[in-house]
Image (cartoon, rainbow, N blue to C red):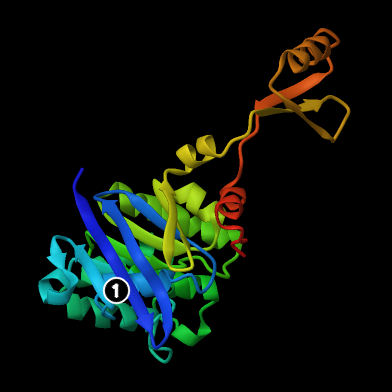
Amino acid sequence: MENIIVMKDIKKIYKDKEVLNNLNFEVKRNEIFGLLGPSGAGKTTTIKILTSQIIPTSGKAVVLGQDIYSFNRSILSRVGILSDNSGVYERLTVWDNLKLFADICGAKKEAIEELLDRVGLGNDKRTIIKKLSKGMKQRLVLARSIINKPELLFLDEPTSSLDPSISNEIHKLLKEINSEGTTIFLTTHDMAEADKLCDRIAFLNDGAIVELDSPENLKLKYSKPVIQIKLKNSDRKITLSKSPESAEKIKLWLQSEQLESIHSYEPSIEEIFLKVTGRKLS
């Protein structure tokens, strides 16, 4: 499958601090790729390099077949960006904000109406931005970032500080956007979000990639040879090693109809990150 992003030996040094250290990874077309790490790990710096907002100290980065050092308007028109700096105009309405960005990228009026309905803001188009809730504003920023129907969408902490219900709405919308052919590159410190959304995730720690694979493969790689048992009339889970002795216990529980559930132990993404880096994500 074609690589839509290639990062090769990227370094970024601010004054005396090395923020990124020989970053190497590729993002495939049509996947959702997650860069996972705690605050200060270098996630936002990575997005800013990939969108040509800052220049790396050394290394090579290619986006949509174009070297970031020679980005032009035609490349940027194929990219959408949702960052921690929303860039919306607080004194304008929802409609006027989208109309402004639609004019810049050449989108038609009909596209604005359709997009507002899609993100659930169709009935709020005349509302002043400063009167929107945080979740509504985030949906507006997402609408703005996809108004040009980008091939590649960058999302920097897209659901940070949002209520779970709003986050789930945005997750559903992102899945729809991806299914229509948009490649998504997102950064997050929310391990459940990465597990739910991403085809592959990379762990970024102290400016370096320390692990990269699909959530499923990472769970298999770091799983333990144990099983978890839940007995009827008990809230406690029992953890057993995979052994003949354990098999005999399970057999007895089955015969006495005490067994409610049994499954192999599967680590969470947060547990895996802690094991690999020695650090918690939050």
User: Which amino acid, mark 1?
Assistant: Ile
Where is 129 relative to 134, above or below? below
* Observer able to see residue 83: no
Q: Is residue 148 left or right of residue 263?
A: left
- Percent x, y for residue 121? 42, 69
Residue 226 sits in quarter: top right
**Between residues 106 and 6, which one lies in front from this camera angle?**
6
Crowd around label 1: few <14 · some 14–19 · many ≥20 (10 Å): some
**Between residues 233 and 189, which one lies in front from this camera angle?**
189
- Give the residue displayed 52% in from the left and 55% down from the top: 193
- Percent x, y for residue 42? 43, 71
- Give the residue displayed 34% in from the left and 63% down from the top: 23
Q: Which quadrant is home to the C terminus?
A: bottom right
Residue 57 sits in quarter: bottom left
* Observer able to see residue 236: yes
Return the residue at label 1: 49
Q: Is residue 61 left or right of residue 131?
A: left
Name of the residue lying farthest toward the front: 16
Name of the residue lying farthest toward the right: 233
